[in-house]
Amino acid sequence: MLGLEVEAFEKISPQFEGVVAARVVSVKPLSGSDHLLVAEVDAGPTGTFTVVSGAPNVRPGAVGVLALPGAKLPGGKEVTERRFGDVTSSGMLCSEAELGLTSRADELWLLDDAEPGADVAQLVGEDWVYEIGVTPNRPDCLGTVGIARELAAYYGLSLRVPQPQVPESQESVSKFVAVEVQDQENCPRYTARYLWDVTVRPSPFWMARRLELTGMRAINNIVDVTNYVMLELGQPLHAFDYDLLEGGKIVVRKASEGEEFVTLDGKLHKLDADTLMICDAQQPVAIAGVMGGENSEVRPETRRILLESAYFKPESIRRTRRKLAINTESSYRFERGVDPNGVVRASDRAAELMASTASAKVAAGVIDVYPQPHEPWQLTLRPKRVVQVLGAEIPLSKTTSILKGLELDIESTSDEQIAVRVPTFRPDLTREIDLIEEIARHYGYDSIEPDLRAEIDQTLAGRGRDRWLDRARDLLTAMGFYEAVNLSFLSTLEAKSFTTEPDRLVRVRNPLGEELAWLRPSLLPGLLASAVRNINRRTESVMLFEHGKVFSRRGEGSYEEHTALAGLVTGAFALRHWRGSPRLVDFYDAKGAVETLLDRLTGEKANFAPVELPWFDLSFSVAVKDRTVGVVGQLAESLLQKFECEQSVFAFELSWDDLRDLCREERVYKPVPRFPAVVQDLALLVDEQVSAGAVEEVIRKHGGPYLKHVELFDLYRGKQIPPGKKSLAYTLRFQADDRTLTEDEVREWIDQILEALKSELGVVLRPR
């Protein structure tokens, strides 16, 4: 409820039994072996045992871990007595990996303070691992201190943050290290510490255990400290082998175009001029905020360390990470924004831990290049506004206690306003409404009682909405369509399959991937992809529509966008029923949807004319009042094969910008006719190349003022019809508002229609 979702949690318990601490009394080589040793170990009250081991750190006086005969180890393994020549090994000296505690398998796990005979499972104890989903706007919670701060504020507890005590020597850091930041825009702050007499060795068990439970591999005490502090404080750090840095100098600069660099994972990267690099006096040694290089990594023989702690501009790290396709724990934090004023604290904490775990000596002071310090910013919070937004009377004392618990400084307080100074570790708090959200989170959404009284300003109803779009949505939904919302980005295949002008396509400058590299020129690719996803999941009847922007390029650096409304139908027209099989949808279902939509929105009849488009096998332009507003048709079979669609698809796409201008603003009431209609059927002989729409247009044009309705009810081709001809049958309804029409009046209009059809289209009555 605080916005930090616990996605999973797991109780961690030792998965072994029968394992005790044991002191090594004596060690001698095993006869006939070049690496095995025979050790006598004292397990206290449990007894003394002879054990054969290959661990290189078995030595007299060391307290290690002994799995007794019959002990149960992770994976169902049971320890038994084993013979090695003439020596019987009664038990097994174990590494951390053999007990399932860490991945370190090379050496015997040594216990510094344990008494022989102590139960190791009890020494390890139980713990819990929580997996917390942190939203991108909360970089302060990418360390355990940030999570603790939230919990302390919620429960009203004191927050205990590590206060580093760095054992600095008399030697000044400036004697050994120099830092030059050439790109201060992308590196606003860079700090460096110098440590020497370092002993690189495995980290203490408690540190390695915590790192590996959080998904990080324990490497050595220097690297592990940087990772530990990052997980603790949220500040990434990097340790360089000082002796591998030319001139003891750090230079922060942009890479040269085409410069090559090998990262710690052994991969060669070709850089561009926008990549921020950490260099020594001669060459790059790290990609800033992302990953270090092979040429300066900490080695077992490393004795001197340069410790980096910095703040990099989030946008710079984000661009670099995407271009190089390198995802690291460091880049994850830097691109979301670390605390620029927490850089030195993290450096101090790491130096303290390196001094204790690696016996390091620490030079006095920190090289800190910070020309323009980030200052906390002030926000004003109005208690009355809190009540307006949340609908709850939250006491002023509760409001201030929440803000203080979150370590937001209260500079002044009154009934009218609270002056709040926001620390730099909260870059997400930039407006008053952000502070109100903080109060809501910690007051508790479930504590806000609903107020069933509502004050609604009716003058605002519908303002800013497109009511015709709402009407179109209602109409399409009523016809059985579902609304889809797709991304505006397409792959190259999708974009180029739905345009006749590839040069006008708009390419995204920094795409997330090639499948999202183009802005859509049409809504149909997204709808088709959505339909295919549904079909692949056995939803074979699909009716979708979408309203959104489409994009095109007018010229170099000039772009335009339009609003479109598109729909798609495929599959069966209705569900299966015991009374009969459903029919498959066809072109006329899509055409009928367009006709209904345009009729209800504009009050005008849509006109259709053949048009050729490469993504349709059959297509017609759609016009209203001689204004073309879109297209409807059957998607091409070749296109459907590219999209791996095995069933016919019919679609339409309308220009909403054009259609919106044609929508009828007023409704005209017409009373129900009081006089009967006169109905006449005409069976016409028509050339094949003449469309039914053209025939209907002539009928309406010459049918006179009383022609109310024209409907095509039959199409026939057969033995009685000459080659190259077809028979079209229409029903015509004539009706007057003030009287009943006579057959003679209707006959005059029929004769006029037939004369016009013959003269304009060569259409005649079909012979009996």
Image (cartoon, rainbow, N blue to C red):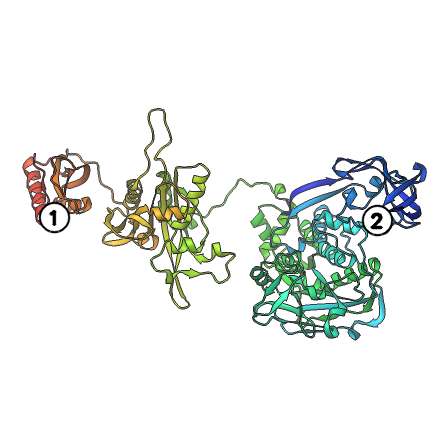
Q: Quadrant of residue 410?
A: bottom right
The residue lying at 62 percent from left, 41 percent from top is 446
Residue 347 shown left or right of residue 391 in the figure = right
Q: Foreground: 554 or 753?
A: 554
Q: Earlier in the sequence, mark 1 or mark 2?
A: 2
Q: Position of residue 51 (x, y in %)?
A: 88, 42
Circles 1 and 2: CB atoms closer than 8 Å: no
Q: Foreground: 627 or 766?
A: 766
Q: Position of residue 613 (x, y in %)?
A: 30, 53
Q: Dot 2: few (<14), some (14–19), or many (≥20) neighbours within 10 Å?
A: some
Residue 116 shown left or right of residue 337 in the figure = right
Residue closest to the far front: 32
Residue 351 shown left or right of residue 395 in the figure = right
The answer to whether residue 187 of the structure is visible from this angle is no
Q: Position of residue 252 (x, y in %)?
A: 66, 71
- Residue 172's place in the image compared with 55, above or below, is below
The answer to whether residue 627 of the structure is visible from this angle is yes
- Kindly identify which numbered label has been placed on residue 55: 2
Q: Foreground: 756 or 447?
A: 756
Q: Foreground: 387 or 687?
A: 687
- Which residue is tagged 1? 761
Mark 1 vs mark 2, CA separation in Å: 101 Å
**Element at label 1:** helix
The amino acid type found where label 2 is placed reads Ala
Q: Position of residue 752 (x, y in %)?
A: 7, 44
